[in-house]
Amino acid sequence: MASILAAGGFGAVCGSSVRTSATITQVAYPEMKRHGYSGRLSTAALATGGTMGILIPPSVPLVIYALLTEQNMAKLFAASLIPGLIAMFGYLGVVWLYCRLRPDLAPPAAAIGWRERRQALAKIWPIALIFLSVFGGIYGGVFTPTEGAAVGAVGTFVAGVAFGELRKREIARSFVGAAETSAMVFMIFMGADLMNAALALTRMPHELSEWIGQLGVSPVTIVACVMLLYILLGCVMDELSMLMLTIPVIFPTIMSLDLWGLGAEDKAIWFGVLVLMTVGIGLIAPPIGLNVCVVNGIVKDVPIVETYKGVLPFVLSDIVRLALTVMFPSIALVTVWWLF
Protein backbone atom coordinates (compact mmCIF):
# COMPACT_ATOMS: atom_id res chain seq x y z
CA MET A 1 0.00 0.00 0.00
CA ALA A 2 2.82 2.40 0.86
CA SER A 3 4.51 1.66 -2.47
CA ILE A 4 1.29 2.40 -4.39
CA LEU A 5 0.88 5.73 -2.59
CA ALA A 6 4.55 6.59 -3.15
CA ALA A 7 4.22 5.77 -6.85
CA GLY A 8 1.16 8.00 -7.11
CA GLY A 9 2.97 10.94 -5.51
CA PHE A 10 6.13 10.47 -7.54
CA GLY A 11 4.18 9.96 -10.78
CA ALA A 12 2.29 13.21 -10.30
CA VAL A 13 5.53 15.20 -10.50
CA CYS A 14 7.46 12.84 -12.80
CA GLY A 15 4.82 12.73 -15.54
CA SER A 16 5.71 9.30 -16.86
CA SER A 17 3.99 6.17 -15.64
CA VAL A 18 6.77 3.95 -16.99
CA ARG A 19 9.56 5.95 -15.31
CA THR A 20 7.59 6.04 -12.06
CA SER A 21 7.21 2.27 -11.94
CA ALA A 22 10.89 1.82 -12.79
CA THR A 23 12.03 4.23 -10.05
CA ILE A 24 9.75 3.02 -7.25
CA THR A 25 10.50 -0.63 -8.10
CA GLN A 26 14.21 -0.12 -7.47
CA VAL A 27 13.44 1.43 -4.08
CA ALA A 28 10.52 -0.68 -2.84
CA TYR A 29 11.01 -4.17 -4.24
CA PRO A 30 14.14 -5.02 -2.18
CA GLU A 31 12.19 -4.11 0.99
CA MET A 32 9.21 -6.22 -0.07
CA LYS A 33 11.47 -9.15 -0.82
CA ARG A 34 13.23 -8.73 2.54
CA HIS A 35 9.86 -8.94 4.31
CA GLY A 36 8.92 -12.12 2.45
CA TYR A 37 6.28 -10.69 0.10
CA SER A 38 5.47 -12.77 -2.97
CA GLY A 39 6.86 -11.65 -6.32
CA ARG A 40 3.37 -11.77 -7.82
CA LEU A 41 1.86 -9.22 -5.45
CA SER A 42 4.97 -7.04 -5.23
CA THR A 43 5.53 -6.56 -8.96
CA ALA A 44 1.81 -6.22 -9.71
CA ALA A 45 1.41 -3.46 -7.11
CA LEU A 46 4.51 -1.61 -8.38
CA ALA A 47 3.43 -1.79 -12.03
CA THR A 48 -0.08 -0.63 -11.15
CA GLY A 49 0.98 2.13 -8.75
CA GLY A 50 2.85 3.92 -11.52
CA THR A 51 -0.39 4.52 -13.43
CA MET A 52 -1.85 6.67 -10.64
CA GLY A 53 0.47 9.56 -11.42
CA ILE A 54 -1.25 10.02 -14.79
CA LEU A 55 -4.40 11.29 -13.08
CA ILE A 56 -3.33 12.75 -9.75
CA PRO A 57 -2.68 16.51 -10.11
CA PRO A 58 -0.40 18.14 -10.97
CA SER A 59 -0.28 15.63 -13.85
CA VAL A 60 2.03 16.20 -16.83
CA PRO A 61 -0.19 14.20 -19.27
CA LEU A 62 -3.16 16.36 -18.20
CA VAL A 63 -1.10 19.47 -18.97
CA ILE A 64 -0.29 18.07 -22.43
CA TYR A 65 -3.98 17.27 -23.02
CA ALA A 66 -4.96 20.79 -21.95
CA LEU A 67 -2.46 22.31 -24.40
CA LEU A 68 -3.53 20.07 -27.28
CA THR A 69 -7.26 20.72 -26.78
CA GLU A 70 -7.02 24.31 -25.49
CA GLN A 71 -8.84 23.50 -22.25
CA ASN A 72 -8.61 25.07 -18.82
CA MET A 73 -5.78 23.30 -16.96
CA ALA A 74 -7.15 24.02 -13.49
CA LYS A 75 -10.54 22.54 -14.41
CA LEU A 76 -8.87 19.40 -15.75
CA PHE A 77 -6.93 19.06 -12.50
CA ALA A 78 -10.16 19.42 -10.53
CA ALA A 79 -11.96 16.86 -12.73
CA SER A 80 -9.22 14.27 -12.23
CA LEU A 81 -9.30 14.53 -8.44
CA ILE A 82 -12.21 12.18 -7.63
CA PRO A 83 -11.31 9.54 -10.28
CA GLY A 84 -7.74 9.64 -8.95
CA LEU A 85 -8.95 9.08 -5.38
CA ILE A 86 -11.23 6.25 -6.53
CA ALA A 87 -8.22 4.64 -8.24
CA MET A 88 -6.13 4.98 -5.09
CA PHE A 89 -8.76 3.43 -2.81
CA GLY A 90 -9.50 0.75 -5.41
CA TYR A 91 -5.85 -0.32 -5.57
CA LEU A 92 -5.51 -0.25 -1.78
CA GLY A 93 -8.69 -2.34 -1.56
CA VAL A 94 -7.22 -4.92 -3.96
CA VAL A 95 -4.08 -5.19 -1.81
CA TRP A 96 -6.23 -5.57 1.32
CA LEU A 97 -8.26 -8.36 -0.33
CA TYR A 98 -5.06 -10.05 -1.49
CA CYS A 99 -3.68 -10.08 2.04
CA ARG A 100 -6.99 -11.23 3.53
CA LEU A 101 -7.60 -14.06 1.07
CA ARG A 102 -3.94 -15.06 0.58
CA PRO A 103 -2.00 -14.05 3.71
CA ASP A 104 0.94 -16.13 2.49
CA LEU A 105 1.55 -13.55 -0.26
CA ALA A 106 2.42 -10.83 2.28
CA PRO A 107 3.23 -12.19 5.75
CA PRO A 108 3.00 -9.56 8.52
CA ALA A 109 6.29 -8.02 9.56
CA ALA A 110 7.45 -6.96 13.00
CA ALA A 111 5.92 -3.65 14.07
CA ILE A 112 8.14 -0.57 14.01
CA GLY A 113 8.21 1.55 17.14
CA TRP A 114 7.01 5.16 17.21
CA ARG A 115 10.53 6.40 17.85
CA GLU A 116 11.78 4.89 14.59
CA ARG A 117 8.73 6.25 12.77
CA ARG A 118 9.35 9.77 14.06
CA GLN A 119 13.00 9.56 13.04
CA ALA A 120 12.02 8.42 9.55
CA LEU A 121 9.42 11.19 9.18
CA ALA A 122 11.91 13.80 10.36
CA LYS A 123 14.13 13.01 7.39
CA ILE A 124 11.44 13.72 4.78
CA TRP A 125 10.10 17.07 6.05
CA PRO A 126 11.78 19.09 3.24
CA ILE A 127 10.01 16.97 0.59
CA ALA A 128 6.69 17.25 2.43
CA LEU A 129 7.13 21.04 2.69
CA ILE A 130 7.85 21.34 -1.05
CA PHE A 131 4.78 19.24 -1.94
CA LEU A 132 2.54 21.30 0.35
CA SER A 133 3.91 24.55 -1.10
CA VAL A 134 3.35 23.48 -4.70
CA PHE A 135 -0.10 21.95 -4.22
CA GLY A 136 -1.26 24.69 -1.85
CA GLY A 137 -0.04 27.42 -4.17
CA ILE A 138 -1.74 25.95 -7.24
CA TYR A 139 -5.09 25.25 -5.60
CA GLY A 140 -4.97 28.44 -3.54
CA GLY A 141 -4.56 30.52 -6.68
CA VAL A 142 -1.20 31.92 -5.62
CA PHE A 143 0.49 30.77 -8.84
CA THR A 144 -0.21 28.78 -11.99
CA PRO A 145 0.81 25.12 -12.46
CA THR A 146 3.80 26.26 -14.53
CA GLU A 147 4.92 28.65 -11.80
CA GLY A 148 4.28 25.87 -9.26
CA ALA A 149 6.71 23.66 -11.17
CA ALA A 150 9.34 26.39 -10.88
CA VAL A 151 8.71 26.73 -7.13
CA GLY A 152 9.07 22.96 -6.73
CA ALA A 153 12.30 22.90 -8.75
CA VAL A 154 13.87 25.76 -6.77
CA GLY A 155 12.76 24.26 -3.46
CA THR A 156 14.19 20.86 -4.36
CA PHE A 157 17.48 22.47 -5.45
CA VAL A 158 17.81 24.41 -2.19
CA ALA A 159 16.98 21.30 -0.12
CA GLY A 160 19.46 19.18 -2.08
CA VAL A 161 22.28 21.69 -1.59
CA ALA A 162 21.45 22.30 2.09
CA PHE A 163 21.53 18.58 2.92
CA GLY A 164 24.69 17.95 0.92
CA GLU A 165 23.05 15.67 -1.65
CA LEU A 166 23.68 18.03 -4.57
CA ARG A 167 27.34 18.68 -5.28
CA LYS A 168 28.98 20.08 -8.40
CA ARG A 169 28.78 16.82 -10.32
CA GLU A 170 25.12 16.19 -9.38
CA ILE A 171 24.17 19.80 -10.17
CA ALA A 172 25.79 19.57 -13.61
CA ARG A 173 24.06 16.25 -14.25
CA SER A 174 20.67 17.71 -13.23
CA PHE A 175 21.09 20.65 -15.64
CA VAL A 176 22.02 18.30 -18.49
CA GLY A 177 19.05 16.06 -17.68
CA ALA A 178 16.68 19.04 -17.63
CA ALA A 179 18.05 20.25 -20.99
CA GLU A 180 17.63 16.81 -22.56
CA THR A 181 14.07 16.46 -21.26
CA SER A 182 13.13 19.97 -22.43
CA ALA A 183 14.59 19.32 -25.87
CA MET A 184 12.62 16.08 -26.14
CA VAL A 185 9.36 17.79 -25.15
CA PHE A 186 9.89 20.66 -27.60
CA MET A 187 10.66 18.21 -30.41
CA ILE A 188 7.41 16.41 -29.61
CA PHE A 189 5.51 19.71 -29.70
CA MET A 190 7.11 20.63 -33.03
CA GLY A 191 6.08 17.28 -34.45
CA ALA A 192 2.56 17.71 -33.04
CA ASP A 193 2.28 21.17 -34.62
CA LEU A 194 3.33 19.79 -38.00
CA MET A 195 0.82 16.98 -37.64
CA ASN A 196 -1.95 19.40 -36.65
CA ALA A 197 -1.20 21.54 -39.71
CA ALA A 198 -1.32 18.47 -41.95
CA LEU A 199 -4.63 17.36 -40.40
CA ALA A 200 -6.10 20.83 -40.90
CA LEU A 201 -5.07 20.90 -44.57
CA THR A 202 -6.43 17.41 -45.29
CA ARG A 203 -9.63 18.01 -43.23
CA MET A 204 -9.20 14.49 -41.87
CA PRO A 205 -10.78 15.13 -38.42
CA HIS A 206 -13.83 16.73 -40.09
CA GLU A 207 -14.21 13.89 -42.57
CA LEU A 208 -13.79 11.32 -39.80
CA SER A 209 -16.48 13.02 -37.70
CA GLU A 210 -18.92 12.99 -40.62
CA TRP A 211 -18.20 9.33 -41.39
CA ILE A 212 -18.74 8.28 -37.78
CA GLY A 213 -21.96 10.31 -37.65
CA GLN A 214 -23.31 8.30 -40.59
CA LEU A 215 -22.60 4.93 -38.99
CA GLY A 216 -25.83 4.97 -37.02
CA VAL A 217 -24.29 3.68 -33.77
CA SER A 218 -24.81 5.25 -30.35
CA PRO A 219 -22.29 7.86 -29.17
CA VAL A 220 -21.49 5.76 -26.07
CA THR A 221 -20.52 2.85 -28.35
CA ILE A 222 -18.12 5.13 -30.20
CA VAL A 223 -16.59 6.27 -26.90
CA ALA A 224 -16.21 2.63 -25.86
CA CYS A 225 -14.39 1.84 -29.12
CA VAL A 226 -12.03 4.78 -28.54
CA MET A 227 -11.34 3.53 -25.02
CA LEU A 228 -10.54 0.06 -26.40
CA LEU A 229 -8.14 1.66 -28.89
CA TYR A 230 -6.26 3.39 -26.05
CA ILE A 231 -6.01 0.14 -24.10
CA LEU A 232 -4.43 -1.53 -27.14
CA LEU A 233 -2.06 1.40 -27.75
CA GLY A 234 -0.99 1.25 -24.11
CA CYS A 235 0.66 -2.08 -24.86
CA VAL A 236 3.29 -0.49 -27.09
CA MET A 237 3.40 3.27 -26.34
CA ASP A 238 3.81 5.54 -23.34
CA GLU A 239 1.05 7.98 -22.38
CA LEU A 240 2.61 11.18 -23.79
CA SER A 241 3.21 9.65 -27.23
CA MET A 242 -0.35 8.35 -27.34
CA LEU A 243 -1.82 11.75 -26.51
CA MET A 244 0.35 13.59 -29.05
CA LEU A 245 -0.49 11.22 -31.89
CA THR A 246 -4.19 10.54 -31.30
CA ILE A 247 -5.85 13.53 -29.64
CA PRO A 248 -5.66 15.83 -32.72
CA VAL A 249 -7.60 13.19 -34.69
CA ILE A 250 -9.98 11.77 -32.08
CA PHE A 251 -10.86 14.89 -30.08
CA PRO A 252 -12.86 16.69 -32.85
CA THR A 253 -14.83 13.49 -33.44
CA ILE A 254 -15.78 13.17 -29.77
CA MET A 255 -16.74 16.83 -29.61
CA SER A 256 -19.20 16.30 -32.48
CA LEU A 257 -21.13 13.63 -30.54
CA ASP A 258 -24.11 14.22 -28.26
CA LEU A 259 -23.00 12.67 -24.97
CA TRP A 260 -25.38 12.90 -22.02
CA GLY A 261 -26.31 16.42 -23.07
CA LEU A 262 -22.95 17.78 -21.90
CA GLY A 263 -21.76 21.18 -23.03
CA ALA A 264 -18.60 21.52 -25.13
CA GLU A 265 -16.27 22.36 -22.23
CA ASP A 266 -17.70 19.74 -19.86
CA LYS A 267 -17.47 17.12 -22.61
CA ALA A 268 -13.84 17.98 -23.36
CA ILE A 269 -12.85 17.81 -19.68
CA TRP A 270 -14.77 14.56 -19.09
CA PHE A 271 -13.21 12.95 -22.18
CA GLY A 272 -9.72 13.98 -21.07
CA VAL A 273 -10.18 12.19 -17.74
CA LEU A 274 -11.53 9.11 -19.55
CA VAL A 275 -8.54 9.02 -21.89
CA LEU A 276 -6.00 9.11 -19.09
CA MET A 277 -7.87 6.46 -17.11
CA THR A 278 -7.92 4.19 -20.16
CA VAL A 279 -4.26 4.79 -20.96
CA GLY A 280 -3.45 3.62 -17.43
CA ILE A 281 -5.31 0.34 -18.03
CA GLY A 282 -3.39 -0.26 -21.25
CA LEU A 283 -0.07 0.16 -19.45
CA ILE A 284 -0.72 -2.85 -17.18
CA ALA A 285 -3.20 -5.02 -19.09
CA PRO A 286 -2.08 -8.31 -20.70
CA PRO A 287 -0.61 -9.35 -23.05
CA ILE A 288 1.99 -6.54 -23.33
CA GLY A 289 1.47 -3.99 -20.57
CA LEU A 290 4.39 -1.59 -20.86
CA ASN A 291 4.64 -0.99 -17.10
CA VAL A 292 4.66 -4.74 -16.43
CA CYS A 293 7.48 -5.25 -18.91
CA VAL A 294 9.53 -2.46 -17.32
CA VAL A 295 9.04 -3.77 -13.77
CA ASN A 296 9.93 -7.31 -14.80
CA GLY A 297 12.97 -6.03 -16.63
CA ILE A 298 14.22 -4.76 -13.26
CA VAL A 299 12.98 -7.65 -11.11
CA LYS A 300 14.69 -10.62 -12.75
CA ASP A 301 13.59 -13.27 -10.26
CA VAL A 302 9.81 -13.00 -10.90
CA PRO A 303 8.37 -14.53 -14.11
CA ILE A 304 6.27 -12.05 -16.10
CA VAL A 305 3.38 -14.54 -16.10
CA GLU A 306 3.23 -14.23 -12.30
CA THR A 307 3.05 -10.43 -12.55
CA TYR A 308 0.19 -10.62 -15.05
CA LYS A 309 -1.70 -12.96 -12.71
CA GLY A 310 -1.22 -10.43 -9.93
CA VAL A 311 -2.25 -7.48 -12.11
CA LEU A 312 -5.66 -8.87 -13.16
CA PRO A 313 -7.54 -7.80 -9.97
CA PHE A 314 -6.11 -4.29 -10.36
CA VAL A 315 -7.28 -4.21 -14.01
CA LEU A 316 -10.76 -5.28 -12.91
CA SER A 317 -10.82 -2.41 -10.41
CA ASP A 318 -9.84 -0.01 -13.21
CA ILE A 319 -12.52 -1.31 -15.58
CA VAL A 320 -15.22 -0.81 -12.94
CA ARG A 321 -13.98 2.75 -12.32
CA LEU A 322 -13.89 3.50 -16.05
CA ALA A 323 -17.40 2.14 -16.63
CA LEU A 324 -18.79 4.23 -13.77
CA THR A 325 -17.15 7.40 -15.10
CA VAL A 326 -18.51 6.75 -18.62
CA MET A 327 -22.05 6.18 -17.38
CA PHE A 328 -21.97 8.94 -14.74
CA PRO A 329 -19.90 11.91 -16.02
CA SER A 330 -20.65 13.79 -12.81
CA ILE A 331 -18.01 11.64 -11.07
CA ALA A 332 -15.40 13.66 -12.95
CA LEU A 333 -17.30 16.93 -13.34
CA VAL A 334 -18.78 17.50 -9.89
CA THR A 335 -15.58 19.08 -8.57
CA VAL A 336 -15.43 21.36 -11.64
CA TRP A 337 -19.03 22.48 -11.14
CA TRP A 338 -18.41 22.99 -7.42
CA LEU A 339 -15.11 24.90 -7.70
CA PHE A 340 -15.80 26.91 -10.86
Image (tube, rainbow, N blue to C red):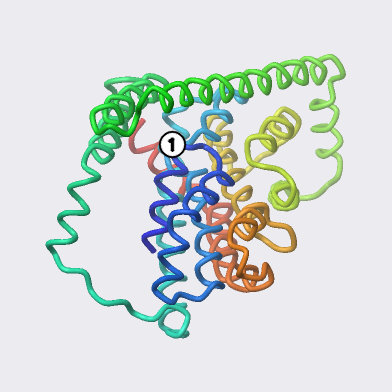
Is the C terminus in the top left, top right, bottom left or bottom right quadrant?
top left
Picture layout, residue 235 above or below residue 45: above
What kind of residue is marked 1? Val
Q: Quadrant of residue 143?
A: top left
Q: Is residue 261 left or right of residue 175?
A: right
Pointer 1 residue: 13
Q: Nearer the viewer, residue 137 or 117?
A: 117
Residue 67 visible in the picture: yes
Depicted 156 relative to depicted 191: above or below? below
| Residue 73 x %, y % | 47, 27
Relative to 331, residue 202 above or below? above
Tag 1: Cα neighbours inside 10 Å, few (<14), some, or many (≥20)?
some
Residue 126 location in percent, x, y? 23, 37
What is the number of callouts on the image? 1
Residue 331 in the image: state x and y as whole percent. 46, 50
- The residue under the point 82% across, 39% down is 212
Per the image, label 1 sits on a secondary structure element best described as helix
**243 or 167, which lies in front?**
167
